[in-house]
Image: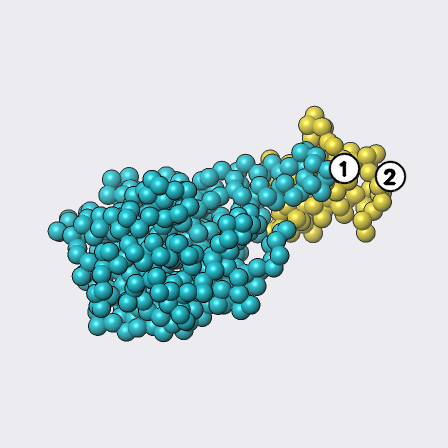
Chain colours: A yellow, B cyan
Amino acid sequence: MNEEQIRLVILDILDKIAPDEDLSDLDDSQPFRDQMELDSMDFLDIVMELRKRYRVQIPEEDYPNLVTMDSTVTYLHPLLKDVESPA
Amino acid sequence: MTLPDESRIVLTGIGLTAPNGNSLAEYRESLLAGKSGVVPFETRYMPPTVAGVCDFEVTRHQKRKEARRGTRAGQVAVYCANEAIIDSAIDWEDFDKSRVGVYLGITEHGNVETENEIYEITQFDYDTSVWSHHHNPRTVANNPAGEVTINMKITGPHLTVGAACAAGNAGFIQGLQMLRLGEVDMAVCGGVSESSHTFGIFASFQSQGALARHEDPTKACRPFDVNRNGIVVAEGGGICTLERLSDAKARGARIYGEIVGYAMNSDATDFVLPSSTRQAECLELALQRAGLSADDIDIVSSHATATEQGDIEEAKALHKVFGDRESLAINNTKSFIGHAMGAAGALELLGNLPAFEDRIAHATINLDDLDPKIALKQLVANEPRELPKVDYILNNSFGMLGVNSVVIVKRYEA
């Protein structure tokens, strides 16, 4: 997956976790939690979904990389670059 | 026996979802029309079966995210509790939420989520790192009541009452007691069931030879009928607001009825098989506490689940207490909706309350051939019965491990 494909995957996961949110105007450079209702359990859902979908194990010390869309995509790209896009 | 208004506990609001109705009005209409809510049903691992399934609007009172995070029992509870508060017409916004208690009866809780998670890890070669972090908050026994408090910003006490299939009555009794103790000023109480979402309950009844089957799902649940063959599992919820009569009067509340008697006891005999002796003692104790005799009761809402022994034992208990009194009407709600487990007792009582107004005892349907071992002449078979008066309704609810409960509600006269 390239970075844009990873971004779409994250958006899909966010849509599942926070179905009441409008994600169309998400600012990729700002923290998710400043833009939507997302608590620590929701955050763990993102980690869990990535684990289930792509068998990606994200160690707890790396969680700060998942603060914004930009940082998330940057962090995940090396881990997912060889994975085929679902789309 | 006259208690002061501060000790008299009345029902002032009702919220419910049953397999044949999502409000008291809809549900009552179905009960009077003989409309079943039992449908074909498929659950994991099991051959096709039947169940009572609810179709209430989950997102009426919950955000989709909240519904996703919680449990089915939580969804049922949140829907019913909100509907009950709306129905009570209380000024909810300004009501002191620290003086509200939530007491919900459950038969079981946590099986649904545990089964789901186990299924999930089987898809990942039993890798427990995919076991959900939501598992614990979803499966703690207080979950459905706790979800209500979060959704409705209730800061008073909440708990669930585990009482097998006597739980609905037990929820009402807990609410009544907390009001009388002065612990709360309003009790949001009753019972809920998500049981149709756990295959284990179906499989266990199947193994016990107690899971109903019939080519027509609506005819599967046949209490007292000689051809009955077991239980129809159902989901649902029945929640009411209870208040002290003094408070209800002060705010001009509509009053559905007054709980004038209740009792709970234990068979202390068997895990599964009921005891007519203890059931009869429970009935007598409730009557005694209400200061009533068997002659006073107009409608008995029976517990009968359409199992061989269960129906016979309850019939024995009822006959022992009520004899052949012709003025009495005995009906059964499970014949319409199946066994809504934790919600059963609550739904069965609530569906009968409109009889205080219309004086009609709804029927027990699917009673084509009365089991000759059931010596009850008062059964309202298949068609509703109009009664000369309805002043007292008695609700039986019994459960596994020999837990018995009886609640008596009196028509309220201002």
Label 2 or label 1, whichever lies nearer to me, is 1
Residue at image x 54%, y 36%?
B136
> Does B253 sit left or right of B224 as displayed?
left
Return the residue at label 1.
Answer: A55
Residue at image x 69%, y 30%?
A63
Residue type at mark 1? Answer: Arg
> Does B386 sit left or right of B35 as displayed?
left
Residue at image x 51%, y 56%?
B211
The front one of B185 and B173 is B173
Mark 2 or mark 1: name the one nearer the start of the chain.
Answer: 1
Few, some or many residues within 10 Å of mark 1 (<14, 14–19, 20+): few
Residue extending farthest left: B1
Q: Is residue B101 visible?
A: no
Q: Position of residue B73 (x, y in %)?
A: 49, 49
Residue type at mark 2? Answer: Asp
Return the residue at label 2.
Answer: A82
Report, in whole angstroms, how far the alpha carbon at label 2 lies from the one at label 1. 13 Å
Residue at image x 26%, y 59%?
B319
Q: Is residue A7 visible?
A: yes
Say whether mark 1 and mark 2 are on the same chain.
Answer: yes
Q: Which chain is indicated by disc 2? A: A
